[in-house]
Amino acid sequence: MNEKVIDIFGTGGLAGLLLAFVVVAPSVAASNLETPSGAYLAGRHAQETRDYAAAASWYEDDPESPELISRTFLMEASEGKFDRARPLALKELTFDSTDAVAELVLLIDRIKAGDKAGALARAEALPAEGVHRFLGPLALAWTRMAVDDLAGADAALRQLDKFNGFAPLEYYQLGLLYDFAGQPDKAEEHFKKTLDVTGQLNWRLTDAMANFYERHGRADEADALYQRFIKDNAGSELAESVLARKPAEPPLPLIDSAKDGLAEALFDLASVVNQPETIDLALLYARCALQLRPHLPLAQLLLSDVLSAQNKPEESLAILAEIPPNSPYSWSARLRVTADLEMLDRTEEAIAQLKEMATEAPARAGAEMQLGDLLRGKKRFGEAVKAYDEAITRLQAAGMPERWSLYYSRGIALERSGQWKRSEADLLHALELKPDQPLVLNYLGYSWIDKGENLQRGLKMIEKAVELRPEDGYIVDSLGWAHYRLGDYSSAVEYLEKAIELVPEDPTINDHLGDAYWQSGRPSEARFQWRRALQFGPEADEVKPIEAKLDRGLVSPARAGGG
């Protein structure tokens, strides 16, 4: 069993070759970096490792090269340096007249300058194909609104019909559009359509609809929406913060200008593409949204999340510092600050802030839940259990629905701290709340097998988890190791080899496969896997046992017993 979650952006291709070149021949590399080709390679490496500031500086080495101008422009835009990106965008369009990002940067410049016709012209020039194909309908809608063309704006948003999965974004934007246009009936119709197609309330839709109801004298309906969101998202700091600060007067509209509408559209698009494989697009669109509306707090929170995911906690902290303490989103920002502090190995500062927040808001559970996760990640399992205990107590006191993930997390901490019976109860309860949840099936099934209890039921649980997540190398590893513990070494090898294909550089999986090879009479292959396990950085307490196996081989393990 392996609980680790991996999110590594590797350096491959040309950047990987550059990295190897610098390591193997530093003196040669240093001299070659002074040439245009060397600067280009360094820029490519910085770009692939998402060090955009460094990439831009390297690309500036040859200001007349079309290739370097293109890359420098993209890096400046991704860094949010639009004053430097704008002149480069004009050059870029002379090389590639279909560059969507260059058109977007110039569109933003025109709409900020109040040049409505110029902004519309840039929106009309956005390509209808390619990775940025979703930009056109959104940009056209709000630039047409800037010139009072409501029918044209509506028609532009309807172009999202041709993209699968974009109905919620289309209806939500139409709701904002008609609300801005002063047509409340059509606005409400489209907000409700958004809810119908999503089947659940996300936060932005909740806040937009509640804002709409409050401005139209329907405060009870607004409160009901907030309460529904809180019930569906127990411990949501966003809804709790908004309810805590609700003013006596109706709120201001979310959208006050076409520029605001475009900022909202870009933020929404950034949210949609905020996935590991498209995270660079999320970064760019979030930067663009904030260029139009610098103090859009949800875009600031999203940008901080993206930067954290790209292992840039210092930059994330700088964005979070821009959210004022009196903002309803301040609580969310402070929680994110603690996550960034942890990434920076400032663990005690993070713990102190979470404890301060928990004391400051004794009815809220979010800080205690995050504290439990942090402590569990640091293997301080006993302390983590206490934090989870408090979080569960607070949710129960507030009458909130139980969360399977909280019982799963506490179950792990209890098991790791030697409190198996309580752990087992929590994991079983998590399955009651979320039947067939693969993480819970995997953890409980493996724990039973490891302890020699409920062997066949445990094996079936892990098999079910693998069926639900066949590409999760850590769950496949659990199934292979379960077969190993049951003495079925041929099946163990089969599944552990599959796990290695999925997660090649995990030390634990390599160690497990080595053990399975040894028990299958394949000592040379076993030692090869144990060496790989050491190469990939196992935990400190795992090093000596692996070295002992390399020296003396493996003593036959006791098989799991019981029933």
Image (tube, helix red, strand yellow):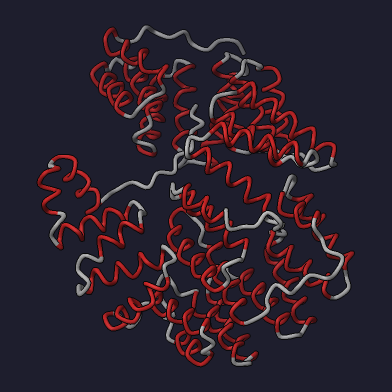
Taking depth in this image into account, of 387 and 99 the one nearest to the observer is 387
Would residue 363 appear left or right of 162 to someone viewing this image? right
Tell me what residue is drawn at x 26 percent, y 57 percent.
Answer: 44
Would residue 137 appear left or right of 354 to someone viewing this image? left
| Residue 441 x, y percent position in the rendering | 60, 32
Judge whether 300 appears above or below 537 on screen.
Answer: below
Query: How many callouts does the rendering have?
Result: 0
Specify the quadrant that holds the C terminus.
top right
Tell me what residue is drawn at x 35 percent, y 58 percent.
Answer: 53
| Residue 16 x, y percent position in the rendering | 24, 48
Tell me what residue is drawn at x 20 percent, y 48 percent.
Answer: 17
| Residue 262 x, y percent position in the rendering | 57, 77
Quadrant of residue 195 within the rendered picture: bottom right
Would residue 223 appear left or right of 19 to someone viewing this image? right
Judge whether 328 appears above or below 481 on screen.
Answer: below
| Residue 197 x, y percent position in the rendering | 68, 66
Judge whether 108 appears above or below 486 on screen.
Answer: below
Tell me what residue is drawn at x 53 percent, y 40 percent.
Answer: 341
Quadrant of residue 40 within the rendered picture: bottom left
